[in-house]
Amino acid sequence: MRKPQINGFPLMLVGYMRVSSESDRQITDLQRDALLAAGVDGRHLFEDHASGAKDDRAGLAQALSFLRPGDVFVVWKLDRLGRSLSHLLCIVNTLKEKQVAFRSLTEGMDTTTASGELLFHVFGALAQYERAMTKERVVAGLAAARRRGRVGGRPFAITGEKLDAIIGALHGGMSKAAVCRNFAVKRTTLIETLARVSGPASG
């Protein structure tokens, strides 16, 4: 029998599961059963025991490396995959660039269908709106700081486009540790700068 294809590539379902701790056996079984029922081969299941906020998810990294063009990456639920909407979209965009489709069983999202692709674009628009609002709050915070006379004294260690890029990266799902590595800033400097720019806006 000829293997199903997407855009001329052979189709393989690759599943990913995540639970917060080793004790969540019931949730693990629930995800596994759903993924197997959806057609994922048990040999192509990847798993992590970690909170969604953690960057070092070895199972996810292995799954993404294993995927090939034409494959379908399947999860039980969206919150098993991404730390945030922006992070989720970043992963799905990476899959699209690799010509890998994405399917979430609980939400019924499937980028191999027209409706699933539309839903993905809606999510993308929401994430873009969230980034715009975040930038607006940062700008408002800086203006409020100037009005309160906080421009004197020790200047901001991170400013301008670099600060905007860091804010965007954080809201795109990048961890503080990764930001410090990629932008060559100290963690204490990053935390202090974020506190100074967000404090007036949130007050």
Image (cartoon, rainbow, N blue to C red):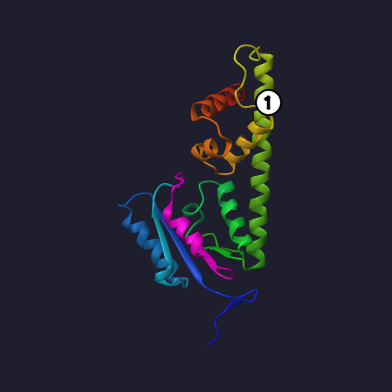
- Specify whether residue 67 is painted magenta: yes
* Quadrant in the picture for residue 59: bottom left
Q: Residue 57's spot in the image, x, y percent?
A: 43, 51
Spot the residue most to the left: 23
For label 1, count other residues whose C-alpha is less than 10 Å away and answer few (under 14), some (14-19) or many (20+): some
> Which residue appears at 54% of the width and 81% of the height?
3
Magenta stretch? 52-75
Decide: is 80 above or below 35. Answer: above
Q: Residue 170's spot in the image, x, y percent?
A: 57, 39
> Which residue appears at 44% of the width and 45% of the height?
54
Decide: is 191 above or below 127. Answer: above
> Disc 1 residue type?
Ala
Residue closer to the observer: 8 or 108: 8
Q: In the picture, which quadrant includes the C terminus?
A: top right
Residue closer to the observer: 51 or 104: 51
Q: Which residue is mark 1?
A: 140
Left or right, residue 15 beside residue 94 = left
> Which residue appears at 60% of the width and 40% of the height?
169
Spot the residue most to the bottom: 1
Q: Residue 82's spot in the image, x, y percent?
A: 51, 50
Residue 31 in view in this figure? yes
- Specify whether residue 181 is painted magenta: no
